[in-house]
Image (spheres, rainbow, N blue to C red):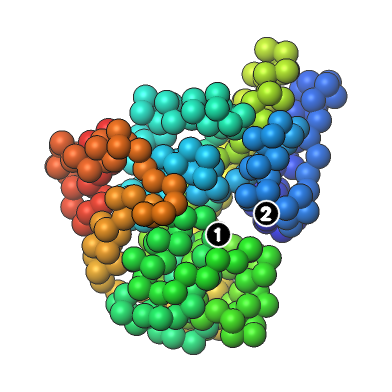
Amino acid sequence: MNSEGHFVNEAGTAMAEAVTERTGGAVTIEMFPSGQLGENSQITEQITLGGDLIGQVGPGTIANYVPDFGVMVYPFMYADYSDAERLLGSDLWAGIEAQAEEQHNIKVLCYFAFGIRDLYTRETPVAVPEDMSGLRMRVQPVTIYTEMVRQVFDAAPTPMPWPEVYSAFAQGVIAAGEAPPAAILDQRHHEHANYLIQTNHILDLSPIVMSASLYNGLSEENQMIVQEEADNACAIMTDTALSGYQAGIDELESLGMTIISDIDLSLFAARAGGMPRASRSGPTVSLMLHARLSKPSKLNYSCGAGNLPAPHVYICSL
């Protein structure tokens, strides 16, 4: 879904070149930026059906197959990236990955930080959730994001494919969206959105996945090469995304957006505490994982989140 010049495509291109070189051409990866192969949901479906694909997909999309996957992008979940690494490196998460691979052919190669997601609006300055009441807000067409818009931002969720968001802002079809600054710049949404509110509501984690059947068909040596180059790409993308956050904010401000940073994040985070399950009607977090996440056994500063409002404390129970 990212443009050719986006850092994800650039890292993917470097990975593809390295894999081709190191495998002597036995494994080749062809790049298709800007959603040429379809949206997240379409790519994920093709992988589950055995398609020979590798790429970045959203955790919320994988959650349509393995509901617990949506937890990794729960709003206000982490104090910093090290908290996320602790979750993703846990035995608990390894079991969730195994479900995706064994039951749905989705093999996770690595994770990276896609960015820090902020709220942005067409013409509405926002200080408290109630300022968003009733506004049509673009949301990824997956359950956990829909519920976040409804519960955390008090807005009207408007599911919409990413490539359609620019024109929707231009025509006034939507009044708000949420994304990392780099993604807003990449798609030029600042041309029709006047305010960016630094809610920092999600540390946006994203996996690089591939068809498990495709991976398993590679030689052990080539599996190792693909894994190593994927890990390298994820490390580069994480560094680019996190180190470039403030530069993205500064660039958006220079392009005319008004940046609102003086807000009480606890007012938004407290509302996220009402999302123990993604939806009453859609995919839900399993009882096992919900029990683990809702029983903070070590509420102290050493766990990295003891000074933050719920649900940051959930990570301490892993």
Determine if residue 113 is in view.
no
- Snapshot quadrant of residue 17: top right
Q: Is residue 303 above or below residue 42?
A: above
Q: Residue at x 31, y 79 (%)?
A: 130
User: How many numbered dots are placed on residues in this image?
Assistant: 2
Local packing at callout 2 (Cα closer than 10 Å; few below 14, some 14-19, many 20+) is some
Q: Is residue 49 left or right of residue 125?
A: right
Residue 4: x and y in percent read: 75, 55
Cα–Cα gap, marks 2 and 1: 10 Å
Q: Which residue is mark 2?
A: 39
Residue at coordinates 79% horizontally, 25% vertically from top-left? Answer: 27
Residue 221 placement (x, y as % from top left): 70, 13
Q: Position of residue 286 (x, y in %)?
A: 35, 38
The one nearer the camera, 126 or 105, is 105
| Residue shown at the point (49%, 87%) measured from the top left | 123
Q: Residue at x 41, y 34 (%)?
A: 88
Q: With 57 as the anchor, is 213 left or right in this view?
A: right
Position of residue 28 relative to residue 222, above or below, is below
Along the line of sight, the residue nearer the viewer: 82 or 67: 67
Q: Name the amino acid type tagged 2.
A: Glu
Q: Which residue is mark 1?
A: 141
Q: Are marks 2 and 1 in contact (CB under 8 Å)?
A: yes
Q: Is residue 211 left or right of residue 291?
A: right
What percent of the width, then of the height, locates residue 253? Answer: 52, 77
Residue projecting furthest to the top: 220
